[in-house]
């Protein structure tokens, strides 16, 4: 069983999946800066509701961003801690890619990068880039977007879909990676993928999935 965690935004999701990536169960909620307090209890509840335990995990999968600095640290710390304690492989999956997999009718995915900036990944592009709120209409080119509810409200994005099913896609993409590389990513080197340093920090290095 793959345990998947996606915390790149205030729309958090968790999923349990079979080793082939098929979803067993998932849950999602809109949180705030209390993600660190909510994520593990909700994961334990999801396991309990599906008659499973942490020890049943065969692998851990986690969204690596870009997105919320705090949220990504919470998800990464939890996933790496479980991978270490359970001696299971871990796979980091680009979050915005997983959001687009979860919403196949969407043309782009948008995550918060700052008060006025966002990370934008358009379908078919290799990497996300930072756009200013005022530049977004031109950069998005009218794309149907996946975006957290708080960001959609702040930026006035009518019709944007929240990434509620993202963790299930994180699990599915991780399952593909594990078939090619059963050992997963390097636990010591896996880090959130930041495209820019959070406010107050001069430089934060990003990790790439192996």
Image (cartoon, helix red, strand yellow):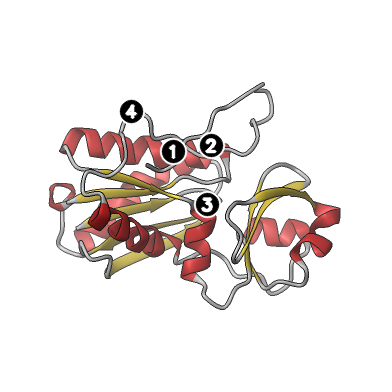
Spatial CA span between label 4 and label 1: 16 Å
Residue, disc 1: 74
Spatial CA span between label 4 and label 2: 19 Å
Residue, disc 3: 31
**Label at residue 174:** none
Q: Are marks 2 and 1 in contact (CB under 8 Å)?
A: yes
Residue 12 pos. (x, y %): 47, 54
Residue 155 picture quarter = bottom right
Residue, disc 2: 70
Q: Secondary structure at mark 2?
A: helix
Between disc 3 and disc 1, whose residue precedes? 3
- Residue drawn at x 31%, y 40% is 185
Drawn side of residue 128 relative to residue 53, left or right: right
Of tags 4 and 3, which is closer to the observer? 4
Q: Secondary structure at mark 3?
A: loop
Residue, disc 4: 188
Of tags 3 and 2, which is closer to the observer? 2
């Amino acid at each position: 069983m793959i345990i998947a965690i996606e915390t790149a935004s205030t729309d958090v999701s968790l999923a349990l999946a079979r080793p082939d990536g098929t979803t067993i169960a998932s849950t999602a909620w809109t949180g705030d800066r209390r993600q660190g307090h909510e994520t593990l209890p909700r994961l334990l509840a999801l396991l309990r509701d599906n008659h499973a335990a942490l020890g049943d995990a065969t692998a851990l999968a986690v969204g690596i961003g870009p997105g919320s600095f705090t949220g990504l640290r919470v998800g990464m710390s939890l996933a790496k801690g479980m991978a270490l304690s359970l001696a299971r492989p871990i796979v980091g999956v680009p979050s915005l890619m997983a959001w687009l997999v979860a919403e196949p009718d969407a043309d782009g995915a948008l995550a918060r990068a700052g008060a006025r900036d966002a990370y934008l990944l358009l379908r078919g592009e290799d990497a996300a880039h930072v756009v200013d709120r005022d530049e977004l209409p031109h950069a998005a080119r009218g794309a149907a977007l996946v975006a957290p509810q708080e960001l959609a409200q702040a930026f006035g994005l009518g019709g944007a879909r929240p990434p509620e099913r993202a963790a299930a896609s994180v699990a599915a993409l991780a399952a593909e990676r594990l078939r090619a590389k059963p050992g997963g990513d390097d636990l010591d080197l896996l880090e959130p993928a930041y495209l820019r340093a959070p406010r107050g920090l001069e430089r934060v290095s990003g990790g790439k999935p192996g």
